[in-house]
Structures are given as structure tokens and as C-alpha cells.
Image: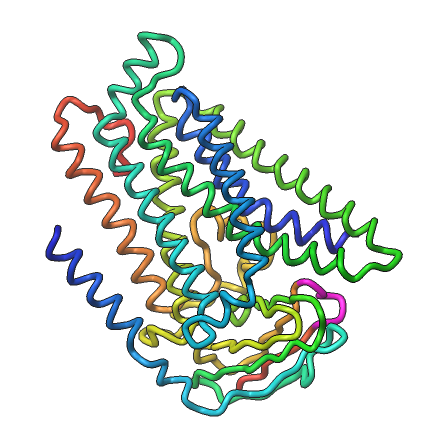
Amino acid sequence: MAGSNKLLSMLVFAALLAPPAAYGAAPIEMTLKDHKFSPSVITVKAGEPFTIHLTNKDATADEFDSTALKVEKVVTGNSDGMVHIRPLAPGKYPFMGEYHAATAQGLVIAK
Amino acid sequence: MLATLVIVFREVIEAGLIVGIVLAATVGVARRGWWVLGGIVGGVLGACLVAAFAGELASLFEGSGQELFNATILLLAVCMLTWHNVWMAGHGRQMAREMKAVGAEVTAGTRSLAALAIVVGVAVLREGSEVVLFLYGIASQGGTTQGAMLLGGVLGVIAGAGVSALMFFGLLQIPAGKLFSVTAWLITLLAAGMAAQAVLFIQQGGYLDVLQSTVWDTSWLLPEDSIAGRLLHTLIGYSDAPNGAQIVAYVATVAIIMGLTRWEHARHPRGNSIPTPA
């Protein structure tokens, strides 16, 4: 048991230390203002991971949330955050700002 | 108001189902109410702390602090759930016997309760911090709809608690002899689902970029953001489009819990098979 635990923790550690190389491409800039995304529709290449750099210009926090993209990330007010998204199959993937879903809606198109 | 109700309900239900399972898994154990209450109170306090320092937390680890924090507390819960099931495999019979003999509460399960209290605390912390941030945003915005939205939040908490109570009382309908076996399975799948979710957070943080491709997609059959999809996501870790690393984590967690449970069971030859999820 002890041996496999050690191996497991080493693997986890190695995985955590490895630089997030797959996200090397320049992030896609996106802002959230008045609880709306801009741009609200982005097109990405299918099969490649990418990153959205989300700048929240509102005073309150919001959560970049998408069950289709399998991400949820809180970005506090007047701050920014990186949203890493894994490779997508071609298709359309809606996302929203969960705390203001009435207006904060967007779409990722993977081609 | 309705939007607020829906969001709060959704978060409360996720933590609440876990509380319901924990309460059912510890039926008959002395002072379990206090342990669970302690977990909830600790979770709420922790949620407020996490919400207050959300910005600072997020900026750790090159902007992936939030993801790694979520993954860490989920994995902590997985360890605690595993420990509970393994412990029950060794002590379940003793507990069942005591319950019959005394006809009331037993003290044997107290140590295992501490582990489950941590699970409750973690669940409340994770979902609660989102509710706190959300409601804080409403409260600080002002406006005429503020009162209605806060009312929606309160109703959401009540509705979520109601569904959790249904879960608990539903589980209590199971005959006592089988209850431990059912809750052992529920806890095993709950832990596996949490492990898979933790993997997702680690990937979202930009780490562990292996087996990231979606393996199957059942969103046409049962979308994860439908009510049934969400319930199953919380209970057994249902994902409508899991990736390879998540599936590995899920299967490995089930296998490890089953293996450890059998091993512990074998060490206590007089323990019966009630709590063994196998």
C-alpha cells in the first residue's frame, strides 16, 4: 500500500508541477461589463485547448459557467481570470455568467 | 426572484443531498446530529471566508488557485468518504449488534462521524461560497428588486433543504438491515463522482493535460444541466461528456474503495457483509 501511495502521490505531484504547456497559445481576450460578455461569440479551432482571459469590469463577482464546456470559474468584481478549456469536438457550446444569466450569455463555436 | 431561487436552490441541493446521505448512513449513532450540524456551521463559516478572499485565492498558483483549492477540498472529501466506508466494513456488525441490544444509539461510530462531518463541511463550503458571492452581489447592487431577490434566496434555501429531507426520509424507508449496504454504495459512488470532478478542476487549472478528450457524449439523452442530470451529477458523478482522465479517476476510486473495504472486512472475520459495497 505504502509503495503505491508513494507512486501515486509522485505522479500527482509531477502532473501538478508540469507547466500547462497545452495552453501556450495566446489567450482570447473577453470582458464582462454591465453583465454582458464582449465578445459574446467566439470561434475556436476544434481539437485544441484554449484559454479565455476574462476581465470583469463590473463591481460584483460573476461565475463563468458552462455545463457544455465543463467549466465553472468565479471572477470577482474588477478583476480578471484565466479560463482554461479542454479540446472541443466541432459544435456550439453556450456559456453564461451564472450570477446574471438574464444578460450574461455567450457562445463558443468550435470548427 | 425566480432566478435567485433557482440558483440558490441548485447550490443548496448539491450540499443538501450529501447531508441527507450522511444522516442516513449514520442512523443510530450517538450525537450524529451535533456532528452534522458542526459540519454545516463550519462549512457556512468557511464559505464566507472563501467568498471574502475569493480574489486572493484566485490569484494563487498563476491564477489557478481557485481550481486547485476546489480540487483539494474535493479530494479531501473523497479520502474521508473512503475512510468511512472502510471503517464501517470493520465495525458495521458491532454497530448493528449494539443498536439491536440497546435498541437506541451507539457510540461506536463517533470516529467515523468526524470524517463525515468533514465531508458535510466541505460540501457546504464549496456550494456555499458561490451562494454567498452571488447574494453579496445582489445586496451590494441595491435597486427595487433587491428585496424580492433576497426572498428568492431564502426560498431557495428552504426548497433545497426540503429535497434533502426527502432524500433522507426516502433512504429511511429502506429496511435497517439493508440501509448500511445502500449507503455504503451511495458513498462509494459519491466519492467517485467527487474524484472525477476534482480531475476536471485540475484540468481547468491548466494542469494534467492527459486524456482530455471527451470519451462519450450523452447530452442528447440526459443533459447535465437538466434537473435529473444535476441530481445524478451530485449523487453518482454523472457527466454527459466525461473525458478520459475523469473516467480513470472514477473507476480507480470505486476500485480502491472496494479493495480496501474487502481487505478491512477480511481483517475482521466476524464482521458481517452488511456495509460492504461488493
Q: Main secondary structure of the magenta part?
A: loop
In the image, residue A55 above or below residue B156:
below
**Front position in the image: B223 or B2:** B2
**Front position in the image: A61 or B148:** A61
- Residue B204 in view of the camera: no
Q: Is B16 positioned to the left or the right of B216 in the image?
A: right
| Image location (x, y in percent) of residue B148 | 83, 49
Q: Is B41 positioned to the left or the right of B196 in the image?
A: right
**Front position in the image: B264 or B70:** B70
In the image, residue A2 above or below residue B88:
below
Residue range corresponding to the magenta coloring:
A99-104
Q: Residue at x 29, y 37 (%)?
A: B85
Q: Is B76 positioned to the left or the right of B49 in the image?
A: left
In the image, residue B22 above or below residue B257:
above
| Image location (x, y in percent) of residue B278 | 25, 38
Q: Residue at x 68, y 62 (%)?
A: A99
| Image location (x, y in percent) of residue B244 | 34, 68
In the image, residue A68 above or below residue B177:
below
Question: Does A103 lie within the magenta span?
Answer: yes
